[in-house]
Image: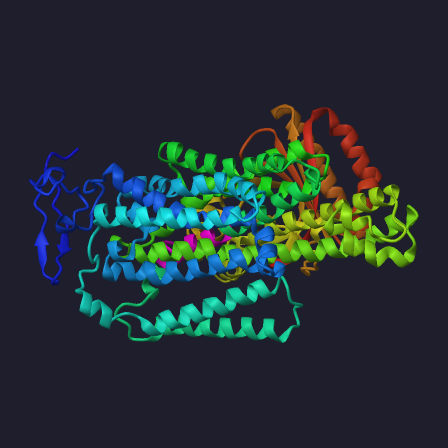
Amino acid sequence: MTTSEPARATAATEDGSFMRQQSEVDVEKTRDALHAENLDMAFVPNDDTEYNVTFKTWIILALSYGISFWIVPALSAAQAVVSAQLGDPTASAWYIPIYTMTVTIAFMICGANSDLFGRRNAQLAAFALPELLPNKWRHSAIVLADIGVYFAVVVGPVAGRFAIEEGEAWRWLFYAPAIAVIFSFAGLYFYYFPPRHPRGLPFSQALRELDYVGAFLFIVATTLILTGVVYTTTLPSHNPRLIDTLVSGFVLMTLFGLWETFAPLKQPLTPTRIFTRDKGRRLTAPFVAGFVVTMFYYALNVIWPTMIAVFFTNETTDFRYAIVLTLPQNLGLTFGAVLLTLLGSKIGHWRWTLTGSVTVMVVFGALLALGTPDRKGLMIAMIFLSEVGFGWAQYLSIAFIQFGTDQVELGISGGLAGVARFAGGSVAISVYTTILTNVQSTEAARIVPAAATAAGLPGSSVAALMAALPLGSAALAQVPGISPDIMTAAGAAFQQSYVVGLRTTALSSLSFGVIGIIAYDKLATHVFQNEPNTYSYYFGIPLEYAAEPSRTDYMFAFEMYDTRDDLYETHLKSEPMTQAFLPSALPLMTTGLDLVHYGVVGGFLDIFGDKAECGIMQDIQIRCIDEAARQKLLDALKMVCRSVEVAQRQEGMGEILTFLGLKSLDNDVGDRIYARYKGRSAMEAWQRSDLVQGFWRVVKGNVADMTSRAYVPNGKGWLWK
């Protein structure tokens, strides 16, 4: 610990000149009784010793941000009734997207410019709170900044449900936060005094150097893109309005990127240097992670409310019960955020905790695919655990984004964090709503008519039944030829269509893991050209996803190296690995770099040396009882390897392309068999052969447990070079 006072950072005064903050000044006892964020004593902290924060500042800023978010959860619970009362039921599709669209734009434009004109003028609560704490507490600051948001997400849906039960009381969902904003504004005006102009520019100069063209391009491009995304939920994919809107938006967004990169700007909205710094590891990779994490959250926001409405409640259910069912989701998010605040610094290992929390979020979120009307308890547990993972991952990913810039560019990083958070939300809502709607409607059209006609409904009434099902029992009663038995059968089939739709939606959320898989392509090219002692670099996906590879984020990797140093000193320390692959892929990998190591005891990699592609591969993992048992198994495995090679070569069968017996180098009881076959029939014939059956009879007493899984190649990497 040092005993000397830290030198204060240089801070800009109103006229652009500079002063030095003296260390002996007691900033808590100045004559005008202002606190450390006093306008006249503002400075940009250089290190973790230069922060001083007052409680009232925290409360005002946190609540001001919560007030702004209130409308999302509150209106989400009431928007269908609100739109009906306003005379346009279809307008509800736009309520929340309009909010996320405008907030995305505001985050980008106001965030970057708060560095020019001062945080106080911008009044950016989301950026101000992280600025007021040292980096080591930045993750906690971001969580605490959302204290008001936690109140909103938990209480907002409850208020919304109660409001729609009382006529036009829903209007107070808007009146109340509007009144609260007045008090928030007053609090910010009197108590919030952050650094005036963090970049040290006078107001007139900042105004001249403002990136007007960039702001215009971003606003128009974002509006067009997110409007087009909303159109995807209401218009067919070939609709000219949808196509024109999206194409125009992406063209303008491309122009925005080119402008920010090549134009001679003094104060760009998104300086190229912050994205390229440290090969993208500082900001770009965390930005992508933040975008993806938010998209998964909105998948849960589509799936869980639909389950509540279709599986667990009906028109006779007390609305208070439906409110109770919303709590596991929102309390899980809050609990995850609290865990990050309490345990984040104690655990450390930020990259791994981000990976772990994303894994929890994805795994339990995907398990919502198991949802049926009779699995309510299981689904409550899954949504709660998935939201716990999100609560941790969301705020930690935002912290990583804000770590990507210096203090004087905190507004830029905060703006990008907001863009990731809300633009990802806009895209996700439309993507998942479209998936659910299309799959459910297709499945309903397939199974509901059959169930209804089997129960006695006339064929001429099927169309009326399909139109009435979403409207409830009153509409169903008007269908010609309807009966209680028909209503029961049709209702059960209608629920089953949602089982299929929600399952597909939950599983589709896994597709974002493809980002990590894509990163393998460039890496494999580098390895092939520059790592002579990397003998094999070969990949596959689970057999069950052979027809739909995009539905899985799991990938099997088979790699062979000459020595351990070729793996750890050459491959894992190569520039493409450390500066490109790991930063983008690692946060999305469920196992991280939890590598296992094996040595070859027998067999062959390529039976004819022609690199013939296989139709299927099999990975068998064996754990023996003890070391002696493993030795017996290895002796038998060596004989099997020789027999297989002789049969394939001498008898000219060629059905088994690869067969390797492997022993673990990490422990004394692990073994493995890796094989590639021409096709599934060849693999199954081999498994039924006398040689294989005899092998397992001989060694079964030495085996503690065993797992086997089949894969198909996915075209990544190469078998040998």
Q: Is residue 523 shown to the viewer in this render?
A: yes
Q: Position of residue 384 (x, y in %)?
A: 56, 36
Q: Which residues are magenta?
A: 278-293
- Residue drawn at (66%, 43%) of the image: 309
Q: Any magenta on residue 281?
A: yes
Could you tell whether 601 is left or right of 110 in the image? right
Could you tell whether 24 is left or right of 619 in the image? left
Q: Which image quarter is the N terminus in?
A: top left
Q: Position of residue 161 (x, y in %)?
A: 56, 42
Looking at the picture, tell me which residue is in the foreground, 716 or 65.
65
- Residue drawn at (68%, 50%) of the image: 504
Q: Work out whether 410 lies above or below 222.
A: above
Q: Is residue 586 shown to the viewer in this render?
A: no
Could you tell whether 69 is left or right of 644 in the image? left
Q: Any magenta on residue 198?
A: no
Q: Quadrant of residue 22?
A: top left
